[in-house]
Image (cartoon, rainbow, N blue to C red):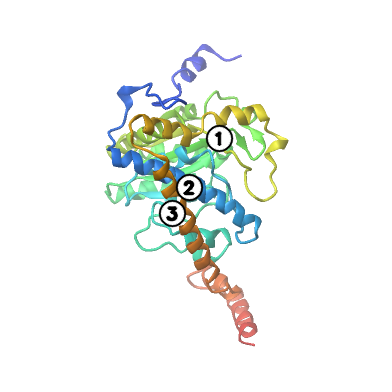
Amino acid sequence: MKTKTLEKVESQFETFQIINEEGEVVNEAAMPNLSDEQLQELMKRMVYTRIWDQRAISLNRQGRLGFYAPVAGQEASMLGTHFALEKEDWILPGYRDIPQIVFHGVTLEQAFLWSRGHYKGGQMSEGVNVLMPQIIIGAQIIQAAGIALGLKRKNTNTVAITYTGDGGASQGDFYEGLNFAGAYNAPAIFVVQNNRFAISTPVEKQSAAKTIAQKAVAAGIHGVQVDGMDVLAVYAATLEARERGLNGGGPTLIETLTYRYGPHTMAGDDPTRYRTTDLDDEWEKKDPLVRFRKFLEKKNLWSEAQENEVVEQAKEDIKVAIKKADGAPKQKVTDLIGFMNEELPYNLKEQMEQYKAKETK
């Protein structure tokens, strides 16, 4: 039985929302100060990402991409958080968080190469403050705490933001990272994209906590739960978290309530085995693109012609990027060995020589 104290804590984490499913403003006081052009740019990025996701799934089925984790349904959560960042901020993504890093400076070609496991996919260009997408669940949480502390010690006016899913919030690294960042008052933003299922495990079976946001209390940091299908609410919450971090207020845990329409990854997952049609239908009515489109149309800021233009641009960009990825040099074993250590130990030196001999034959 939950104590009154626990119920009191959980009641503090009500879902933050600005626009509802009909695109109507329900929280005028929280409306962020964005220009018409910025509002349109947000919509462009979400439409672009939805088309990119559709094309990436097709490319994966054709055998032209390797690992891919679908993102449809999570565009507001991903792009709303990113829109609140500055170019100098650091992003530590999980394997699904490719849209954020592409809009932060990573090229589409590079994203495709990463999906194929090519080493060039992880070689970030100078000035692109992004770490390679993390495959190990939750490992990026500890890394973000460390980078944020480093940014603080260097007196930079920047933050580190990292992403994981609800499954990542069940990992030990999650708690260690939050605790470390809180103890050192580091400018970190921890985003948990609660899409309700860690592969097939529902969030209700992962934790007895009513919200993931309330887990911030134990770490002594700020926590907020946001409607992850509302791009304006996500943006506003992240902007506030960034300002808090820069002003000495410490880290923030943001839980975005969202939903992935597709499978966990394209590696054989079948969501129909653990999700009901009724649940899918419920969340499709909350679609972030539909909601924001209605909001913009009420303000005469979006049209079918504008959307079609973005769709065609996305298709063309993807066509060009996958062609460039196809032309990348074939990866060799010596490439992988060479990047493993700054100075190779004796056993890898021996292997390097052996593979070099084979490659010259």
**Disc 2 to disc 1, how far (Cα)?**
15 Å
Query: Is residue 145 among what the camera can see?
Result: no
Compared to residue 134, the image places residue 353 above or below, namely: below
Badge nearest the viewer, 2 or 1: 2
Circle 2/circle 3 CB separation < 8 Å: no
Q: Which residue is farthest front?
A: 305
Q: Contact (CB < 8 A) between labels 3 and 1? A: no
Q: Label 2 to label 3, Cα distance in Å?
A: 11 Å
Task: Work out which quarter of the rendered image holds the C terminus and state it.
Answer: bottom right
Q: Position of residue 118 (x, y in %)?
A: 55, 65
Disc 1 residue type? Tyr
Q: Which element carries disc 1, helix, strand or loop? A: loop
Q: Earlier in the sequence, mark 2 or mark 3?
A: 2
The residue depicted at 42 percent of the width and 29 percent of the height is 223
Foreground of the two, 282 or 162: 282
* Mark 2 residue type: Thr
Q: Residues within 10 Å of mark 1 (few under 14, many from 20)?
A: many
Q: Which mark is residue 259?
A: 1
Residue farthest along the right direction in this orientation? 273
* Chain-order first, disc 3 or disc 1: 1
> In the picture shown, does residue 349 fall above or below 99?
below
Residue at the top extreme, as displayed = 4
Which residue in the protein does label 3 denote? 313
- The secondary element bearing badge 2 is classed as helix
Q: Which residue is mark 2?
A: 49
Q: What is the three-letter code of the residue carrying label 3?
A: Gln
Q: Residue at x 58, y 27 (%)?
A: 282
Task: Classify residue 228 as left or right of residue 158.
Answer: right
Q: Crowding at label 2, few (<14), some or many (≥20) Cα neighbours within 10 Å?
A: many
